Image (tube, rainbow, N blue to C red):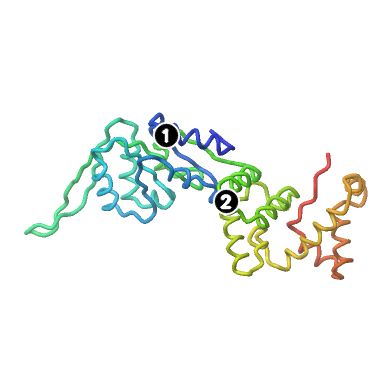
């Protein structure tokens, strides 16, 4: 199921928090707040890429008699890549009320190291976060049992959430730049994230060309795009539509950049390869 707003995400997290959902898989692009949302769960433990099979077993042992504690499996792509962890977590993700997790290890005895089976009971509800749609065949059984949500907010939705989350400390210059270039369609669709904003703020505070962090380009390309955007901003919608029907709006903008910056047309064309002109229907 696809969801596109933070309000929908909040309702899913609330339902899981209230134990209405036993197993949830939450997939989205990186950096838009799914892990942050899971951190707000009342009682939970987090399993991430740093956990070892032994540490996982010990963590399950600690919560064995606390059925109200939920399990968050974060960075699941890495976690499930470990065969031992994967086998244990497939047992954890069974949808039975009570699950018995078995793990084989070795125990040092007078005759040397001998295989030993350990077991622990698990009653926890589980939420799995992932940056990619689960495709591994070994995870298919888990996907079939779970409520799977693809969180795909628009750039506008993410920008509004950044403003809301960082309300007291928002860097107005950075967020206004993101908003402006998103409105102008310079920033690619569905690419803005909290990381986009935070990295730009760090670069700005360090005295670097922070705009390049947002547009994912080098400084030279940014200067060309800034020039093209200035050209476009001085044109009326009527002029843009007229050029669309004639020589082409994009060609006109490139020609103007060539004139302003006094460079070769092909150089400007290459530097503006990521510049998007408005679409007039």
> In which quarter of the view is residue 100 placed?
top left
Reply above or below: 182 against 113.
above
Q: Residue at coordinates 37% horizontally, 38% vertically from top-left?
A: 126
Q: Nearer the viewer, residue 260 or 115?
A: 260
View extreme (left): residue? 110
Q: Residue at coordinates 28% horizontally, 48% vertically from top-left?
A: 59
Q: Nearer the viewer, mark 2 or mark 1?
A: 2
Element class at badge 2: loop
> In which quarter of the view is residue 245 placed?
top right
Q: Nearer the viewer, residue 209 or 163?
A: 163
User: Where residue 49 sits in the image (x, y, percent)?
Assistant: 39, 54
Q: Nearer the viewer, residue 65 or 115?
A: 65
- For the residues labelled 2 and 1, the Cα–Cα distance comes to 29 Å
What crowding class fits label 1: few (fewer than 14 Cα within 10 Å), some (14-19), or many (20 or more)?
Answer: many
**In the image, 4: left or right of 102?**
right
What crowding class fits label 2: few (fewer than 14 Cα within 10 Å), some (14-19), or many (20 or more)?
Answer: few
Q: Residue at coordinates 69% horizontally, 50% vertically from top-left?
A: 179
User: Where residue 92 sits in the image (x, y, percent)?
Assistant: 32, 40
Q: Nearer the viewer, residue 266 or 123?
A: 123
Q: Earlier in the sequence, mark 2 or mark 1?
A: 1
User: Where residue 29 sits in the image (x, y, percent)?
Assistant: 55, 47
**In the image, 258: left or right of 9?**
right
Q: Which residue is denoted by mark 2 in the rendering?
A: 168
**In the image, 27: left or right of 82?**
right
Q: Which residue is denoted by mark 1 in the rendering?
A: 16
Q: Residue at coordinates 19% horizontally, 46% vertically from top-left?
A: 118
Element class at badge 1: helix
């Amino acid at each position: 199921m696809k969801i596109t707003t933070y309000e929908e995400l909040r309702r899913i997290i609330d339902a899981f928090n209230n134990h209405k959902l036993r197993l949830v898989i939450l997939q989205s692009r990186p950096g838009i707040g799914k892990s942050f949302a899971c951190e707000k769960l009342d009682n939970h433990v987090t399993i991430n890429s740093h956990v070892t099979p032994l540490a996982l077993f010990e963590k399950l042992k600690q919560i064995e008699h606390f059925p109200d504690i939920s399990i968050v499996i974060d960075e699941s792509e890495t976690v499930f890549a470990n065969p031992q962890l994967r086998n244990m977590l497939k047992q954890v993700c069974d949808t039975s009320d009570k699950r018995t997790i078995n793990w084989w290890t070795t125990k040092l005895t007078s005759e040397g190291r001998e295989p030993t089976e350990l077991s622990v009971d698990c009653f926890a509800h589980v939420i799995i976060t992932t940056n990619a749609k689960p495709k591994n065949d070994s995870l298919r059984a888990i996907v079939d049992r779970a409520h799977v949500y693809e969180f795909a907010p628009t750039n506008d939705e993410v920008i509004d959430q950044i403003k809301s989350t960082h309300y007291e400390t928002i860097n107005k210059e950075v967020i206004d730049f993101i908003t402006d270039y998103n409105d102008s369609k310079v920033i690619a669709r569905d690419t803005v994230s909290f990381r986009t904003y935070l990295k730009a703020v760090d670069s700005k505070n360090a005295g670097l060309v922070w705009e390049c962090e947002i547009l994912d380009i080098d400084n030279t390309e940014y200067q060309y795009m800034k020039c093209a955007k200035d050209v476009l901003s001085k044109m009326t919608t009527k002029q843009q539509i007229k050029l669309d029907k004639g020589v082409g709006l994009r060609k006109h903008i490139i020609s103007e950049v060539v004139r302003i910056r006094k460079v070769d047309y092909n150089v400007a064309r290459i530097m503006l390869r990521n510049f998007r002109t408005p679409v007039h229907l």
